Amino acid sequence: MGVIESYRLRWRRKRLLARALWRRRELHALSNRTAAIGSEPILLFATLRNERVRLPYFLKYYRDLGVEHFLLVDNGSTDGSAEYLAQQPDVSVWSTQASYKRSRFGMDWVMALLRRYGHGHWCVVVDVDEFLIYPFCETRPLRALTDWLDASQIRAFSAMLLDMYPKGPAEDQPYREGQNPFEIAQWFDSGNYAISRNWAYGNLWIQGGPRTRAFFPDRPKAAPALNKVPLIRWHRSYAYVSSTHMLLPRGLNLVFDEWGGEKASGCLLHAKFLDTFAAKASEEMARGQHYAESREYKAYLDGLRDQPDFWCKWSEKYINWRQLEILGLMSKGNWA
């Protein structure tokens, strides 16, 4: 990388950090239990809006993995999400009515909390419909993974976002509060992914899967990115650049081994396509608070008019993480 490009990235990181500090004033604590955070906790950070029906299983899933405290931003929910979270003993929740779009789609708020509370800790940064799968996750807690990452001097753990979907129209299979969403959304695309390298930031850029074939068949490069870095030992000088797709310093994005091996990675099972999806897409389209004038949600609404069935003859039913490794969607690397 040239001197000019290196300087440009350093300057951008400083601007992102300054934005987060400025946006911190938009957050108002509803329940701040961070004083109870221990010396070496695993923390989870997220922004949400009107996700009450998802929250019980989301919290249970990550508690079972080993997350010890949740630091969440509620962006003007009207369904009781904030009130429910404020009652949870291991949750600190902040509220804001400020613009989701002007906060870089919630990342400024999350980074403000990461800088204040996440420094020096392993942090999970996800949406409430994303569920982290990593090697040996059925038998080893998240602490085993972070201990191994520490011993290997690895600061960040990448994961591919894997869109999960039901067989048949989602509207025909109602989701119940507290239910495991993957009892309904059991299927995924085993192939149909395009991977390229972002030379400026050093990360891999992944697109494809059911969202591309269902909503962006004629514009695959406009489809959402599937590469994410959801687990990181945070430092107050770090910054997420675009959602959790990439970070600065750029060395945090080097999730591949240039010498021929393969670094450990995981998947984020994405429970977006439930019967709640159409109403959520309509709400977000009306708000107009998403990237590129909510282009993604416009494509969703256009595609949902025909009640699509995402299942096709190439769909594969999810079994476990080893299945995903065999398919090349994640890797245990040299973690034995």
Image (cartoon, helix red, strand yellow):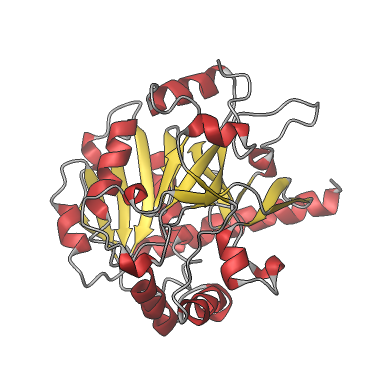
Which residue is at 55% across, 81% downward?
293
Q: Is residue 211 left or right of residue 45?
A: right
Nearest to the observer: residue 72 or residue 283: 283
Furthest residue toward front: 313
- Specify whether residue 276 is in view: no
Nearest to the observer: residue 13 or residue 275: 275
- Residue 84 position, x and y percent, is 16, 56
Image quadrant occupied by the N terminus: top right
- Residue 145 position, x and y percent, is 47, 24
How many numbered tags mark residues here? 0
Q: Is residue 170 left or right of residue 15?
A: left
Nearest to the observer: residue 246 or residue 184: 184
On screen, residue 102 above or below 72? below
- Residue 25 position, x and y percent, is 35, 64
- Specify whether residue 137 is in view: yes
Which residue is at 79% across, 50% downward?
199
On screen, residue 93 above or below 33? below
